[in-house]
């Protein structure tokens, strides 16, 4: 019976009854009207709400949609220099429980283990049975599937809370660059720790200087070299010598930053920034630049390398002796230890130490990762140390330090702090002059000699005019002394060396000799060809156009008199007192030489080199 029919019957009854019966009917009538009005209002409100939700836009819809995740993720994204995402945070659920609400800890732990096979069932059981606790985590950062399976168990006392989890979309590729963070999203290694405060502030993504394409190439070639030469590890980097931007940085073995604890300690060890090694003959880059910059010898000068140099119980000799007077270019090209020692002796202990200090080789570099090795330098610095340091022994530094110092030798003599953060286009890069531009010009010529005629020939790449230096040093054993045939080999190169823009460094840890290398495990047979393969692949990506080695401007820029002026008396050091004083006025305290694109020595370059930096815009050398 409808509400209308009921009301009509009540009206008829009211007309036929009187007295108390009539009063009762009127009361019922009133109550029925009130009840009907209430239902009418209720259904009306539901109808209005349905119309509001389905037909009308509502400003709170977005807010309600965001209720399932944090209003603001507590860690900023990280992208490479081209905007590719390399680290991000996602909202996840974490399961927790109140032990006081758990009636059967043993049974609950068993059920949880059935959906979380890797969980420590005994540990969870003990936590759930603790009478003095009201909160315990079951598992943090659950996957959606894991959350669903736990929820299906229907266990009273288990709840979920929303948290953030750090993800690394590129996997192991940038492991030592990015590092990793803990479950509370605190950075523990790499830029995650070095830039922790900036990342925790959230907001705009942090852009690294790394180009993921170059990183891929670097890792592939180093990984292939490790496999081929049966090395225990490798490291390498690609750097812009004018901005200090590190475009690629790899250390092998590496690890998964999403699960760093699953890898051994050696995999988390950063061979680029944390490892410090005696670098061998690559140090002759700095030894030769030092002597030329101080003026104790000229490029046309030289030294007698006919006889080894006795020193205590030891003798300094050349691995591939050329027993005669050698010009400075020949000493560098043949990698003569004897000539290098005599070159350093003319500078002296104070001058050597001061020069290496200017190049940043005696103190830990400032960098965006916290894994920074402290150089091992002699204390005190004696004449015997001067002699061994001349050919890269008796001092241990990181590959990053060598790369930054070598960049200053090639870029016109300005030290630029290396960085993993992308520099804005057009920004002024601050640097400090550490040597004369003329010294840098000469060193570029000598570095080309090593690759064209010396130990770095296997690192040459047609069209890219590579210049560099090889280095081999035996590793120091745990109990001191050198380990025979346990070498660190390296190749430091710039290209195109007549007008350089980029540095490539390749380092191998304990490579083995092969049949094709005639049993040799020195850098010319492994690190140099590895560096050459890297240059051949990254060159096109960096926009470096191949050059004709016989082009007049190239030949002019690289011309050097290999014979020198012949034997003659060597000049004594003309600088009194602190030999480390520069030959050009030093900038005032706190001041720095602005460097951007192509720095002051560019006037020495006969032909502009159009370069497309990885940032995208074209920069022309001036």
Image (spheres, rainbow, N blue to C red):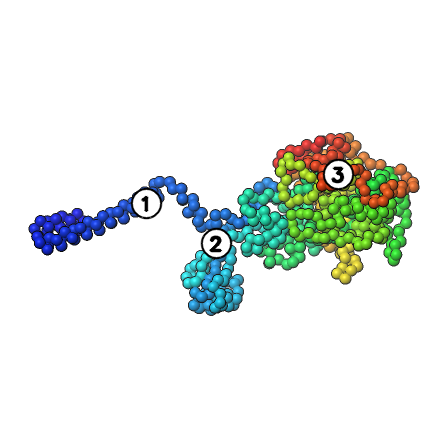
Q: In this view, does 209 lie to the left or right of 280?
A: left
- Look at 65% across and 55% down and name the residue there: 267
- CA–CA distance in space, label 2 to label 1: 30 Å
SS at badge 1: helix
Mark 3 vs mark 2, foreground winner is 3
Q: Mark 3 points at which residue?
A: 587
Point out which mark residue 49 bears. 1
Q: In this view, does 52 lie to the left or right of 182?
A: left
- CA–CA distance in space, label 1 to label 3: 74 Å
Answer above or below: position of 155 versus 358: below
Q: Position of residue 218 (x, y in %)?
A: 66, 46
* Residue 337 visible in the current orientation: no
Answer above or below: position of 521 versus 300: below
- Look at 83% across and 41% down and name the residue there: 294
Where residue 351 sits, quadrant-wise, is top right
Q: Position of residue 613 (x, y in %)?
A: 65, 37
2 and 1 marks in contact (CB < 8 Å) = no
SS at badge 2: strand
């Amino acid at each position: 019976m409808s509400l209308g029919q009921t009301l009509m019957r009540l009206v008829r009854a009211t007309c036929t009854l009187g007295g108390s019966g009539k009063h009762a009917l009127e009361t019922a009538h009133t109550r029925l009207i009130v009840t009907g009005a209430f239902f009418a209002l209720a259904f009306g409100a539901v109808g209005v709400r349905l119309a509001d939700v389905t037909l009308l836009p509502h400003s709170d819809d977005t807010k309600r949609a965001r209720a399932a995740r944090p209003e603001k993720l507590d860690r900023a994204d990280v992208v490479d220099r081209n905007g590719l995402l390399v680290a991000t945070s996602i909202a996840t659920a974490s399961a927790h429980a109140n032990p006081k609400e758990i009636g059967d800890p043993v049974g609950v732990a068993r059920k949880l283990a059935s959906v979380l096979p890797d969980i420590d069932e005994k540990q969870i059981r003990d936590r759930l049975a603790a009478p003095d606790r009201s909160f315990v985590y079951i598992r943090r950062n659950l996957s959606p599937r894991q959350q669903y399976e736990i929820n299906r168990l229907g266990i009273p006392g288990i709840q979920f809370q929303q948290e953030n989890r750090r993800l690394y979309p590129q996997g192991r590729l940038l492991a030592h660059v990015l590092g990793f963070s803990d479950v509370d999203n605190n950075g523990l290694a790499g830029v995650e720790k070095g830039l922790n405060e900036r990342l925790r502030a959230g907001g705009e993504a942090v852009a690294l200087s790394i180009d993921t394409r170059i990183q891929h190439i670097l890792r592939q070639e180093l990984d292939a070299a490790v496999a081929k030469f049966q090395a225990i590890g490798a490291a390498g980097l690609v750097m812009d010598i004018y901005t200090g931007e590190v475009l690629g940085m790899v250390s092998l073995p590496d690890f998964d930053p999403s699960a760093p604890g699953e890898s051994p300690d050696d995999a988390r060890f950063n061979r680029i920034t944390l490892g410090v090694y005696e670098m061998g003959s690559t140090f002759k880059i700095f030894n030769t630049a030092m002597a030329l910059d101080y003026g104790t010898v000229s490029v046309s000068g030289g030294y007698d390398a006919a006889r080894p140099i006795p020193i205590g119980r030891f003798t300094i000799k050349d691995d591939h002796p050329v027993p005669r007077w050698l010009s400075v270019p020949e000493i560098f090209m043949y990698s003569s230890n004897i000539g290098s020692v005599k070159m350093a002796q003319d500078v002296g202990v104070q001058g050597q130490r001061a020069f290496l200090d200017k190049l940043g080789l005696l103190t830990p570099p400032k960098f965006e990762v916290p894994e920074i090795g402290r150089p091992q330098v002699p204390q005190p610095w004696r004449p015997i140390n001067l002699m061994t340091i001349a050919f890269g022994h008796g001092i241990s530094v990181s590959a990053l330090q060598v790369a930054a110092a070598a960049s200053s030798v090639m870029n016109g003599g300005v030290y630029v702090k290396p960085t993993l953060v992308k520099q804005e286009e057009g920004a002024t890069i601050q640097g400090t002059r550490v040597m004369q531009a003329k010294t840098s010009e000469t060193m570029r010529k000598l570095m080309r000699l090593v690759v064209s005629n010396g130990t770095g020939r296997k690192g040459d790449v047609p069209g890219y005019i590579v210049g560099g230096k090889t280095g081999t040093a035996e590793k120091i054993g745990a109990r001191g002394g050198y380990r025979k045939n346990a070498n660190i080999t390296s190749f430091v190169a710039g290209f195109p060396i007549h007008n350089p823009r980029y540095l490539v460094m390749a380092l191998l840890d304990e490579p083995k000799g092969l049949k094709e290398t005639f049993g040799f495990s020195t850098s010319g047979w492994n690190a140099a060809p590895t560096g050459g393969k890297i240059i051949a692949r990254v060159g096109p990506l960096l926009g470096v156009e191949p050059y004709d080695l016989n082009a007049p401007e190239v030949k002019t820029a690289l011309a050097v008199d290999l014979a020198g002026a012949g034997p003659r008396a060597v000049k004594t050091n003309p600088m009194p007192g602190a030999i480390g004083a520069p030959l050009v006025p030093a900038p005032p305290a706190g001041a720095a030489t602005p460097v951007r694109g192509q720095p002051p020595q560019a006037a020495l370059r006969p032909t502009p080199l159009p370069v497309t930096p990885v940032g995208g815009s074209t920069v022309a050398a001036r």
